[in-house]
Amino acid sequence: MHPRTQRILQRLEKLGSISDAPNCLSRFYGTTAHIQSRKVLIEWMESAGMTVHCDNIGNVRGILKSKAPNAKHLVVASHYDSVFDAGKYDGPLGVLLGIEIAQQVSESGQDLPFHLQVVAFADEEGGRFNTAYLGSGVLAGYFDKTWLSRKDDAGETLDSVIQKMGHHIDLVNDEAIPKEDWLGYYEVHIEQGPVLCDKDLPVCLVSGIAGQTRVDIHWKGMAGHAGTSPMDLRQDALCAAAELTLIIEALGKKHKEKLVATVGKMIVGPNSSNVIPGTVYHTLDIRSMQDHFLAEMVAYLEQQALTIAKKRGLHCEWKVMQSNPSVDCDPQLSAALEKGIKKSGVRELLSIPSGAGHDGVMISKVAPISMLFVRCTDGISHNPAEYCSPEDIEAALFASDAFLEALADSIK
Amino acid sequence: MHPRTQRILQRLEKLGSISDAPNCLSRFYGTTAHIQSRKVLIEWMESAGMTVHCDNIGNVRGILKSKAPNAKHLVVASHYDSVFDAGKYDGPLGVLLGIEIAQQVSESGQDLPFHLQVVAFADEEGGRFNTAYLGSGVLAGYFDKTWLSRKDDAGETLDSVIQKMGHHIDLVNDEAIPKEDWLGYYEVHIEQGPVLCDKDLPVCLVSGIAGQTRVDIHWKGMAGHAGTSPMDLRQDALCAAAELTLIIEALGKKHKEKLVATVGKMIVGPNSSNVIPGTVYHTLDIRSMQDHFLAEMVAYLEQQALTIAKKRGLHCEWKVMQSNPSVDCDPQLSAALEKGIKKSGVRELLSIPSGAGHDGVMISKVAPISMLFVRCTDGISHNPAEYCSPEDIEAALFASDAFLEALADSIK
């Protein structure tokens, strides 16, 4: 194993040990562990030869400036916050690979034709304030001020946490890299899915990030006594929700090549074994790379929900909570990445869409993006069992080195 | 309206105002409101001419002793505890009617050929300790000592509450009426269902109490990322539960003349919109007057659950938590009640099974039972909207007077 790979592994262990929870990994935005991990990241970036600062949302940003006139920024990034009971690769792997390729550039004394900016985003998961992409949003110039009043489970506001971290809210909007200054964005991330395991490949290109629509569905029927209400006089909200859940699953299976659809959350009221459910709230999470098709499928499911409601004499409220279009990775960046993957000796080139969302969704609003997926065992993530082998991490490192080289060549 | 009916209405209002909750009716076992309502009941029973005592579980018991040698006990009873956010008729109506018919006997100086014992059971709903039929269980000699260690939501044990009420746990087992001393049991209760409204009748006979089986069902699949897990590689516990829920509903509808089947409670894990459900727990409540048929249907549903589990690659645990056989009302008592209903001028005789459980389930272990249902608007109960009209209450009162008379005649 190369000493650089070893250093990445050591750093993954180190970051993985900085947690707010005693028995598992948890690093939410603005907590003690979060702030502590930031210090460590600053140290590592500085020792890699970068000029480092922590911006006013908490992103750690290391820069290797180019001497080229009118040089633009290539941002290599991922996030350093985590979900609760997390694995240690989701986020940190991309940050540490970024630091490692920067250190190689710095130590070689090479002057790239672009500024290389390695960024560790402060909040991507949004676990504390439900503020996914908070860090990358700030870098792209999309900071939503209404989020400042959001509260965590303990009732503390985002506003208050940002100030306690020592940041100036008034300056957050100045942290963005202006659109015209971007060369592009590159992120290495674990796949969080089973395809690379299935194909027995260490890494692959990401073709894009799936569009995602999230819907809240509220059913209102009539609660009643489970022993005395005849079957044909019921308005059972749970049976209606069950019917829609199976229609959603069947639709996903029918279009399994281009769609995933999930009912992940369901809350039944009054939720008592001897009372007919009067209310049910549940979610729909539906994703596809094809925006038009996705919109069609969402409309179809809404129609199905209304049909069920009518048939059963219930009320159904259909509330689209979030709708992100799909994002394509940039052909030119991807061509350089393809060269990098080939050069690093990976047996086969593969390009797959990402069903999971990533910071690139935000960055794509202002800059071309590219991503490299790394195999993680059984596709498991958001789980302490999350695992990447040293060999696969090394493959990702060499591919990233070669990507940087190919990109520099293409610009010179 | 007869002054006796008026007195019942006033007392319903009075009892309905004694609550532990500030904005709704709630009278759980052993609470301040529960103990306060007991005092009021003792007062009313005494003023009706009965000898009254409160037994060691908290049942309020008023007796009009018969002078007949070897006289047995006719118990006329219902309960004075309530669910949370209750209506004021469920329980108290039967107790107050009992007091009223006893007062008439007492004031007339009549010597019945049986002891008339009016009982207000301390706990039928079991809302605090999940101890349904606690009061009637003690009267029938079926007190489950293992219940003493059960805790309420605040962590207080049943044992401690009984002692705080001033009762002696060692003496609880002595409170039972021995099997050989029972003449029978009679209870007036609101229907809690829609049949009397549908037939436009004030009261009817109860033919029996349905058998009830309660099952806890635990599904264990595999949680996963809603964006990255292909549809055909999922083990979605909620989709399995939804499938079974609809099979349960379909079975109930197919046999709607003799079965009700309900999934009332469902809890999904981890219950997050972007995570495939890995676990689901839900209940099955299934009831029928036909015990053999009920057992067959439960077995059929278990088979269906296992088939779903196998098909979907999930684990399913099927745990029967409770299984009460159906109870038939006694033909002789019912014959006397039939006479009573006829004599009181009700247009049509109707006899229906009770889908809801009642204290008679416990008492039937030692004595013949009979019940009279009173119409409640739209079948609504366990709800502040629960309502019985004064006219229907009066019909129940007169039918109960006449039942007592017919029963006395049949014994003399």
Image: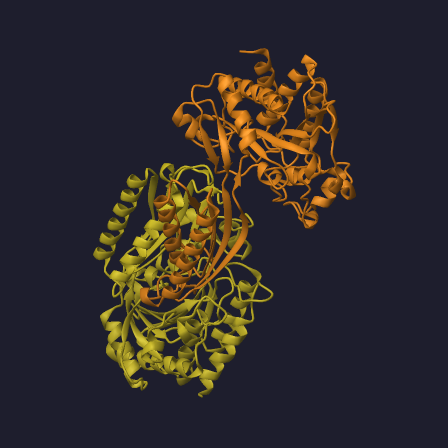
Chain colours: A orange, B yellow
Q: For this rendering, which residue is in front, A101 or A192? A: A101
Residue lying at 41% horizontally and 84% vertically, measured from the top left:
B391
**Residue lying furthest bottom:** B1
Residue lying at 41% horizontally and 80% vertically, measured from the top left:
B393
Which quadrant is home to the C terminus of chain A? Answer: top right
B187, above or below A1, in the image:
below
Q: For this rendering, which residue is in front, A342 or A88? A: A342
Residue lying at 29% horizontally and 63% vertically, measured from the top left:
B367
The count of marks equals 0
Residue A220 relative to residue A333: left or right = left
B236, above or below B165, in the image:
above
Residue B188 relative to residue A177: left or right = left
Q: Taking the image as drawn, is residue A383 in sight?
A: yes
Counting from the top left corner in percent of width and height, residue B299 is at 25, 49
Residue lying at 46% horizontally and 69% vertically, measured from the top left:
B52
Residue B396 quadrant: bottom left
Residue A46 relative to residue A370: left or right = right
Q: Taking the image as drawn, is residue A274 in sight?
A: no
A133, above or below A62, in the image:
below
Counting from the top left corner in percent of width and height, residue B247 is at 30, 53
Counting from the top left corner in percent of width and height, residue A380 is at 46, 31
Residue B283 relative to residue B34: left or right = left
Q: For this rendering, which residue is in front, A199 or A152? A: A199
Counting from the top left corner in percent of width and height, residue B13 is at 52, 76
